[in-house]
Amino acid sequence: MSMEVQVQEASIEQQDETINDNDEEELEDEYEVYEDIDRLQEFGINVSDIKKLKGNGMYTIASVMMTSRRDLTSIKGLSEAKIIKIIEVVNKIQNFGFKSGSEVMEKRKSLLKISTGSTAFDQLLQGGIESQSITEVFGEFRTGKTQLAHTLCVTAQLPKDMNGGNGKVVFIDTEGTFRPQRIIAIAERFGVDPNAVLDNITYARAHTHEHQMTLLVGVAARMIEDHYALVIVDSSTALFRVDFMGRGQLAERQQTLGKFLSSLRKLSEEFNVAVVITNQVVADPGAGSMFMGDSKKPIGGHIMAHSSTTRLYLRKGRGEQRIAKVYDSPSLPEADALFQLTDGGIADPET
């Protein structure tokens, strides 16, 4: 099924007809940037061993190379000899060695840019939320983190010519913040069918950090079957804070959080999806002079800082206006943009 959401100039019936008539194979050709792990059969790897890899969240050739040999050998039923053979085959199928800068540049042309719903915010990000990377959004309560997540659920499904990702969305909810009613209002603002938008959102409510991590295995399985453009985790750190209490468990918490973020990064690169995670903040009066003159700092420490590609700091402005600041990015300059929270999601401030 095409993920393209039709603009509302056509009737809902015409939208459904257009979606059903689109050629599924053309979508696969356009978006498939991975090699299916089933290709291992062509090189003599047993189906039972491939199933064991899938059972551990590996559905692509790249996912095997992104998994350490230590983790591979921990899979029940896979011996050291089998692991060595699988890795040899994987290297034959796909080049995981050095590439030229030109090849990297060519690959980056496939990146998606998903609109935030605000022109000024998009300009701040030089086009929108980028795929093949993790974008972290942090700030106090009511600064627009969840509203941005809901807006992206809609814009990620818009056609590319509307600055969308033309794909489905995964929403992992750790705090019970997802509201379908908000999706409906935002969809109506963009002139798209709310029911189609809701159908294209794959939602899961996580209750523990283990559950949160397990859900990522299911995400990989779904991305093999359909085209996805965006993965949202709202919030990424809440359950880790609850499940690991006190300084005595801090090291274990950070190690486990790092593994979760690493899995998200691998997903983004494997399937060319954008990953957006929201994060909480804590008061740190002693760091006020260092942290943008603010006494708030994001949860997660260095693990979060190094795992996130782009870090966005949201803070309150006047009324429903909010300010987004690029806190850290390998390609974006430090700058800020003004946006507004509306019934239709994130938008430019009213003049």
Image (cartoon, rainbow, N blue to C red):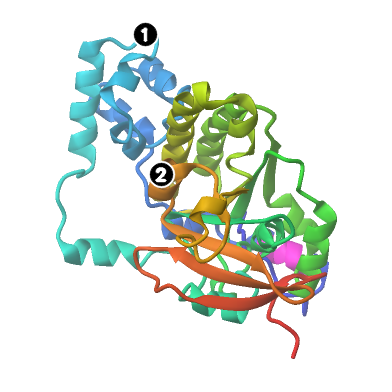
| Magenta stretch holds residue 210 | no
* Residue 302, numbered label: 2
Q: Which residues are magenta?
A: 14-19
Front-most of residues 44 and 335: 335
Q: Which residue is mark 1?
A: 77
Secondary-structure class at tag 1: loop
> Residue 42, how many percent across, how many down?
28, 29
Report the amino acid beneath label 2.
His
Q: Is residue 87 visible?
A: yes
Vertical placement of residue 63 versus 81, above or below: below
**Residue in the picture at 63% in, 45% down:** 235
Residue 101, compared with residue 68, is above or below; it is below
Outermost residue, bottom direction?
351
Earlier in the chain: of badge 2 and badge 1, it is 1
Figure quadrant of residue 79: top left
**Within 10 Å of the Cα at label 2, are there few (<14), some (14-19), or many (20+) other Cα atoms?**
few
Query: Residue 179 placed where, x, y %?
Result: 80, 51
Q: Residue at x 34, y 63 (%)?
A: 330
In magenta stretch: residue 15: yes
From where the camera sits, is residue 159 visible?
no
Q: Nearer the viewer, mark 2 or mark 1?
A: 2
Predominant secondary structure, magenta span: helix
**Mark 2 to mark 1 CA distance (whole Å):** 36 Å
What element does badge 2 sit on?
Answer: helix
Pointer 1 local density, CA inside 10 Å: few below 14, some 14–19, many at least 20: few
Q: Which residue occupies the foreground of this view, 132 or 119?
A: 119
Which of these two is toward me, 156 or 128?
Answer: 128
Q: Is residue 226 left or right of residue 203?
A: left
Q: Quadrant of the C terminus?
A: bottom right
Point out residue 276 in the picture as x, y percentages from the top left corner: 55, 53
